[in-house]
């Protein structure tokens, strides 16, 4: 499923913590890992050379960590900006998953998610696993702590029944064969969309969507998952997904990276990207199929 993964690193402690999470991906079929560091200094050859020399010892240590987890690991240093270079290398090397941390540099603020990670999510043509890093206090002595203890303990699958959500579910079906302990299937009846003109049809929508969720549940049961819960709340999708993950001891969120409202999501930021920004657990985002224009 994820035979070759690309691991984005900014050489920070946060990146070290992300790499420590990745042994579980071996159970998902990951064999090769490409460790990528982007310098962000294209056309500045002398600075790029100095930064490369400075980066090499840390990259060698991170590569060794991947190898100790059983990966066949390689290194790539790119001169351009992280978001662009990581997606370019992912396509060039035909990777099946990009892994990126949600904190960078000092691990005290969301540098990657605010910049490179957001660019990766917008342009990625392969799934992206965003690994959340918790920051210790006080900030001056901040320590990066893993938020990825056992990905498959309790998976939350959020769906809007779009084509991209269906594609995301196909990945969940494969992950289900790896023996997750519990899966929650969640669809949020969007209060903003329904309240204005469709409130009188909420019962109808609940009946239809409950049947859809039961169909998904049946598919997962055939793959051996024993504990499956269905949730069909009425509210605000981002808030409901994030809160379910936080208060129901979820270990991983899986969802499509674009839903029904593709154009508005490009302009305003999608539900999935906002979930990635606010969730306290790792998020696996499955990108929509993109048509390349000739």
Image (cartoon, grey):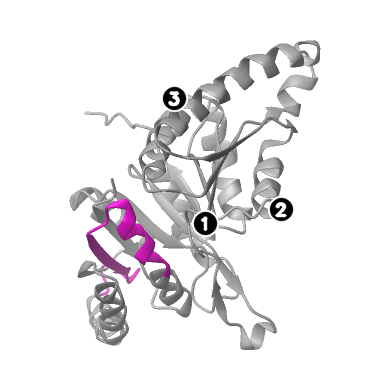
* Residue 48 in which image quadrant: bottom left
Q: Report whether residue 75 is seen.
A: yes
Q: Which residues are magenta?
A: 21-44
Assign a secondary structure to mark 2.
helix
Q: Which residue is mark 3?
A: 163
Q: Find out whether residue 27 is within the magenta segment.
A: yes
The residue carrying pointer 2 sits among few (fewer than 14), some (14 to 19) or many (20 or more) residues within 10 Å by Cα, namely few
Circle nearer the viewer, 3 or 2: 2
The residue carrying pointer 3 sits among few (fewer than 14), some (14 to 19) or many (20 or more) residues within 10 Å by Cα, namely some
Camera-side residue of 82 and 33: 33
On screen, residue 237 above or below 21: above
Circle nearer the viewer, 2 or 1: 2
Q: Which residue is mark 2?
A: 247
Q: Who comes first in sequence, dot 2 or dot 1?
A: 2
Quadrant housing the N terminus? top left
The residue carrying pointer 1 sits among few (fewer than 14), some (14 to 19) or many (20 or more) residues within 10 Å by Cα, namely many
Residue at the spot x=55%, y=77% of the render? 144
Q: Which residue is mark 1?
A: 282
Q: Who comes first in sequence, dot 3 or dot 2?
A: 3
Residue at the spot x=81%, y=11% of the render? 200
């Amino acid at each position: 499923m994820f035979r070759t993964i690309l691991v984005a690193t900014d050489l920070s402690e946060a990146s070290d913590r992300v790499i420590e999470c990745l042994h579980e991906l071996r159970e998902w079929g990951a064999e090769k890992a490409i460790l990528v560091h982007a310098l962000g200094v294209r056309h500045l050859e002398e600075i790029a050379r100095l930064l490369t020399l400075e980066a090499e010892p840390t990259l060698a240590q991170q590569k060794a960590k991947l190898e100790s987890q059983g990966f066949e690991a390689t290194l790539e240093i790119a001169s351009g900006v992280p978001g662009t270079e990581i997606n370019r290398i992912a396509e060039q090397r035909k990777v099946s998953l990009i892994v990126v941390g949600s904190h960078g540099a000092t691990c005290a603020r969301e540098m990657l998610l605010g910049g490179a990670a957001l660019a990766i999510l917008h342009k990625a043509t392969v799934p992206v696993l965003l690994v959340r890093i918790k920051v210790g206090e006080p900030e001056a002595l901040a320590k990066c702590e893993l938020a990825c203890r056992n990905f498959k303990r309790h998976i939350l699958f959020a769906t809007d029944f779009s084509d991209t959500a269906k594609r995301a579910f196909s990945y969940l079906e494969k992950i289900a064969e790896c023996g997750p302990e519990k899966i929650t299937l969640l669809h949020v009846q969007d209060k903003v969309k329904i309240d204005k003109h469709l409130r009188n049809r909420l019962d109808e929508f609940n009946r239809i969507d409950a049947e859809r969720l039961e169909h998904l549940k049946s598919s997962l049961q055939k793959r051996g998952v024993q504990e499956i819960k269905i949730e069909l709340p009425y509210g605000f999708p981002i808030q409901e997904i994030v809160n379910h993950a936080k208060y129901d001891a979820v270990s991983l969120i899986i969802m499509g990276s674009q839903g029904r409202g593709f154009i508005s999501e490009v302009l305003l930021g999608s539900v999935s990207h906002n979930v990635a920004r606010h969730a306290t657990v790792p998020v696996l985002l499955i990108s929509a199929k993109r048509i390349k224009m000739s």
